[in-house]
Image (cartoon, rainbow, N blue to C red):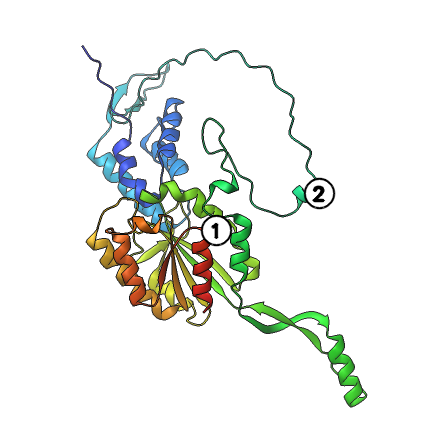
Amino acid sequence: MSELWPPLPLFDLFREVREPLGLRPDDYHLLLAALDRGFGCESLDNLKQTCRLLWLKTNDRRTIDYFEAVFDRYVAQNPPQTREEEDRQPGDGSSTTAITPPAALRPAPTVPRPPKPPPRPQQPDRRPLQTLGALREGDPQLHQTSAEGYILKPTDFPFQPHLARRSWRRLRQIARLGTTGKVDIPATISAIARDRVCLTVPLEPKRVNLVELVFFIDRDGSMVPFHIPCDRLLATVEAKRFFRVEQYYFRNVPDRSVYLRPKGAQTKRLDELLPSLSDSRTAAIVLSDAGAARRGYNTPRVELTGEFLEALQPWVRSIAWLNPMPSERWLGTTAEEVQNCLESVGGAMFELSHEGLNDAVDFVRR
């Protein structure tokens, strides 16, 4: 006879708040570990506080109110059972009431772990010493991407980070704004030669790149396999070289608002963001497969994406869409129709590759 698994504690609650709070399976495992160690089992308030500490990544009041409302509704639908325990001390007539969570709230029994194998003798570190060149500012360090310790090399990406950095540097719109605080020697000499006196010392003008880069990045769903390449691409953008660099995130389609972080609940409405852009300086860069990864066609996604592009176009200088899927995979999918929507508003779609990035930069520069 097969043994039935006990219900997972608070799993329905986790499923309901997972997408709004940007949670991952690891966040649910953290809650299981906390319950297994006795945290959150004293009372409902203690349980709510434990969930808040583990799942809420922001102090935003609206997010906190949303979570508490969902939690209270969940508890109302799954009321805990109470039992009266007689625990009287001599001369004390009080009784204590303990809360027994229902089966859906009690942690599942833990399975004993097998004994750990004896530790292997440590091998001496044979990594070469860092040289001066290795200590200079360069590409961000690559971390392990699997349990086997496999590390992606720069050659494994569809673009070379140092070449991508050079491509971004070609986006320039130089203007003189303010001063550097240093004396302009040639201007000072010219003033003395002309007026024989220099009452006001001229200062060197500050050269500023007025180009603004605003990224709209598709996260989760079919874009999960492309998180690492997209993050590496964003790391090649040197914010100090531009007047403004901002990143916003969405899931499938940027509807009425976008997220401020890849994993979080803080949002910004598009009707607040778009007026802050510049139709002469801002380049909008969209990172998304546009549905090509699933090789399907989604009419509502096409319509919503078209509405977003039409709303974005009047506020920016240009729109370039970088698609991590090869161009031949766009045919017959949502991405092909999104490409047509882009062209109708003066934008263009490019592959997320070295050649595609160069073409996108040239498109923005024109």
Viewer-side residue, 346 vs 1: 346
Question: Residue 180 vs residue 142: left or right?
Answer: right
* Front residue of this view, candidates 35 and 190: 190
Horizontal side of 299 relative to 21 (left or right) equals: left
Query: Which amino acid type is marked by label 1?
Result: Leu
Earlier sequence position, callout 2 versus callout 1 = 2
Image spot of residue 281 (x, y percent) = 46, 69
What distance separates the C-alpha of mark 2 from that of mark 1? 26 Å
Query: Quick check: 102 above or below 89?
Result: below
> Considering depth in this image, is 89 or 335 the residue closer to the camera?
335
User: Mark 1 sits on what residue?
Assistant: 234
Residue at the spot of label 2: 132
Q: Quadrant of the N terminus?
A: top left
Q: Residue furthest bottom?
A: 195
Looking at the image, the residue that sits furthest to the left is 1
Let me know if residue 198 appears in the view: no
